[in-house]
Image: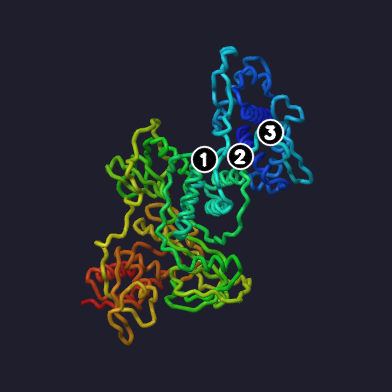
């Protein structure tokens, strides 16, 4: 629990200029911004209150008021401006900007480059990080973001990746995210009355529904044909299976091979995917999954009669 | 105890920051609140405090005093180096930074990104709220090694680590850059055993890494560009397969192929692919709706794969 005097000093030096620009902020807010407890912020404020310049008469002390949990600084003495950033802070911000840029269009990348130059003016550092994103981007990102921000519904034509079909759907987009090389939108899908995730590069067409909104229904029933307690033996040569499907993997135990347990999941998708790895992935359980995969393999094998 | 030390460090910072001229050590020990005990104890305390403040990244300038004073060094914190100064930072830019730093969720880069933002938010720039950005990032959590690797890169110290690969386990590397590539973390550098620039996945590092005590053991070539060393698609290795696709099936596969002939039940397409393994997975995924016509070696590989699954 005991925090070093140095950590507290650093926080106190940052608190005063922050308060100066956020007059009347509440203690809980401060605690959240500084990632510490309300009690700690209270203790810090009491301490800061007693600090000041040589002489240490009321005129030379840092002057602040805290009433009913709201804080105001009236005289910060020599702590008017925030401390300069350190190397770690600067590096994290530059990497964040590179990441943002990698998901965005050209117009904003110029703006971000300009911003990086401004920041580097405050502290020139060698940045040990490089961000590269080969995502193809999507022409629909801005429409989806605006729909999320304003609670608007969208009509999409979607080429399913798990069912091999193309469908028209009305969706209420909820979250947009980038994972591996792809961008996804998770949404309430009115057509299937369930939460669904769509990969942006598989959206063939998208229209904003004018004046149309969809209300999400809250349901608990899981709609997929799901299998529980799935255990696989994945050979090291098939480790891309693990890396590409982190979202469905519950845990991985490493031995000679990987022993992988999955979350409950759509069995059709799983059979199709595991089969693609041939003998590199072995189903430990359940039995019906391994039977299904073998049956599929035989059916495909029958397309290629032996000469 | 910690309270008194914290208070003294804050008072010392305030005093050294407020002064235009250098403050003599004797002035500091007499006037700044918190220095107590014998002369020797006070001096030791002051030496430690200076080191502590410097470890926070605060520059304490040491200067010779005016000849009228005794031969005693003076101290001050130059405002210019202490204070954050980002000229012309706009509210929109600050908003961009907040959005960007929120990508890290609660990973190892988040605390430093957030404290950086907090400092920028203390500059008194009005916030802009007109950005609709919603996209989030989900990525492999950066490993705890980032801090150490950054240090090795900045100090140009060689590292040794165990790597999970079938061949060579122990690697000796001159680390050049940490790479965040399509949601995964890598280290790129000069592999001293293989005498070439190699890429390593951070998730395959086993255990701790060892960092050489020496600094400046190598230089990153001035023309080094990470992008030149990434495995990339090479037009020379693109192959073309001919497949039959059942009517109304495999829309995604059709999208990237070229229609050759249209049939009643099956259409024939030509599709380009780079790696056989990945392409076979895609074919198999479509079950009996997609059938390979050629080339012959691709068909043979598919049959081997299926037989492996059946046995």
Q: Secondary structure at mark 1?
A: helix
B127, above or below B278, in the image: above
In 3D space, how far apart are the residues under numbered discs 2 and 1 (Cα atoms)?
Answer: 12 Å
Q: Earlier in the sequence, mark 2 or mark 3?
A: 3
Q: Are marks 1 and 3 in contact (CB under 8 Å)?
A: no
Q: How is the image coloured?
A: rainbow
Q: What residue is shown with label 1?
A: A122
**Residue A302 in view of the camera:** no
Q: Is residue A28 left or right of residue A151?
A: right
Q: Chain of mark 2?
A: A
The quadrant of the image that shows the C terminus of chain B is: bottom left
Q: What residue is shown with label 2?
A: A82
Residue A277 screen position, x and y as percent: 35, 65
Residue A222 screen position, x and y as percent: 56, 71
Q: What residue is shown with label 3?
A: A77
Residue A41 screen position, x and y as percent: 69, 41
Q: Residue at x 78, y 44 (%)?
A: A67
Q: Residues within 10 Å of mark 3 (few under 14, many from 20)?
A: some
Residue toward you, B239 or B25: B25
B236, above or below A24, in the image: below
Q: Residue A238 occupies which quadrant of the picture?
A: bottom left
Q: Residues within 10 Å of mark 2 (few under 14, many from 20)?
A: many
Q: Earlier in the sequence, mark 1 or mark 3?
A: 3
In 3D space, how far apart are the residues under numbered discs 1 and 3 (Cα atoms)?
Answer: 23 Å
Q: Secondary structure at mark 2?
A: loop
Q: Chain of mark 3?
A: A
**Residue B83 in view of the camera:** yes
Q: Is residue A70 left or right of residue B49?
A: right
């Amino acid at each position: 629990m005991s925090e070093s005097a140095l950590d507290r000093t650093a926080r106190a030096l940052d608190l005063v200029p922050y308060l100066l620009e956020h007059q009347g902020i509440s203690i809980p807010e401060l605690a959240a911004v500084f990632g510490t407890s309300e009690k700690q912020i209270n203790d810090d404020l009491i301490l800061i209150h007693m600090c000041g310049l040589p002489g240490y008469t009321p005129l030379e002390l840092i002057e602040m008021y805290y009433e009913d949990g709201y804080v105001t600084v009236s005289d910060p003495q020599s702590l008017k401006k925030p401390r300069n950033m350190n190397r770690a802070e600067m590096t994290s911000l530059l990497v964040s900007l590179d990441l943002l840029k990698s998901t965005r269009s050209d117009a904003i990348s110029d703006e971000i480059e300009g911003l990086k130059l401004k920041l580097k003016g405050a502290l020139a550092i060698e940045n040990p990080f490089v961000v590269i994103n080969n995502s193809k981007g999507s022409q629909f990102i801005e429409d989806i973001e605006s729909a999320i921000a304003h609670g608007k519904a969208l009509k999409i034509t979607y080429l399913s990746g798990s069912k091999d079909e193309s469908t028209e759907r009305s969706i209420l987009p909820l979250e947009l995210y980038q994972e591996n090389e792809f961008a996804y939108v998770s949404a309430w899908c009115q057509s299937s009355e369930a939460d669904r995730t769509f990969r942006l590069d598989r959206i063939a067409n998208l229209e904003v529904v004018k004046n149309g909104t969809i209300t999400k229904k809250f349901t608990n029933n899981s709609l997929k044909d799901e299998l529980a307690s799935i255990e696989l033996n994945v050979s090291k040569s098939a480790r891309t299976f693990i890396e590409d499907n982190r979202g469905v993997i519950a845990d991985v135990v490493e031995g000679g091979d990987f022993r992988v347990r999955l979350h409950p999941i759509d069995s059709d998708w799983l059979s199709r995917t595991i089969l693609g790895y041939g003998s590199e992935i072995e189903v430990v359980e359940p039995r019906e999954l391994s039977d299904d995969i073998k049956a599929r393999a035989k059916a495909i094998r029958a397309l290629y009669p032996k000469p | 105890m910690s309270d008194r030390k914290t208070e003294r460090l804050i008072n010392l910072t305030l005093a050294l920051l407020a002064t235009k001229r250098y403050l003599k050590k004797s002035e500091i020990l007499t006037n700044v609140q918190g220095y107590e005990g014998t002369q020797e104890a006070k001096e030791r305390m002051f030496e430690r405090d200076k080191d502590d403040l410097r470890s926070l990244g605060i520059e304490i300038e040491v200067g010779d005093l005016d000849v009228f004073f005794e031969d005693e060094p003076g101290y001050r914190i130059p405002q210019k180096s202490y204070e954050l100064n980002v000229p012309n930072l706009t509210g929109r830019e600050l908003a961009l930074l907040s959005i960007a730093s929120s990508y890290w969720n609660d990973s190892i880069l988040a605390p430093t990104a957030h404290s950086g933002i907090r400092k920028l938010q203390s500059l008194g720039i009005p916030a802009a709220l007109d950005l609709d950005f919603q996209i989030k990032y989900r990525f492999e959590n950066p490993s705890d090694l980032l801090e150490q690797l950054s240090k090795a890169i900045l100090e140009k110290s060689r590292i040794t680590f165990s790597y999970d690969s079938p061949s060579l386990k122990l690697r000796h590397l001159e680390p050049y850059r940490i790479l965040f590539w399509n949601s995964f973390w890598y280290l790129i550098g000069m592999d001293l055993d293989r005498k070439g620039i190699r890429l390593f996945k951070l998730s395959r590092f086993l255990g701790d890494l060892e960092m050489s005590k020496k600094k400046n053991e190598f230089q990153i070539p001035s023309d080094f560009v990470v992008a030149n060393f990434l495995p990339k698609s090479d037009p020379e290795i693109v192959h073309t397969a001919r497949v039959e696709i059942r009517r109304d099936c495999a829309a995604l596969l059709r999208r990237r192929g070229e229609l050759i002939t249209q049939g009643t039940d099956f259409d024939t397409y030509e599709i380009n692919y780079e790696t056989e393994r990945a392409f076979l997975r895609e074919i198999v995924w479509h079950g009996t709706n997609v059938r390979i016509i050629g080339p012959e070696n691709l068909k043979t590989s598919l049959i081997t794969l299926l037989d492996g699954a059946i046995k």
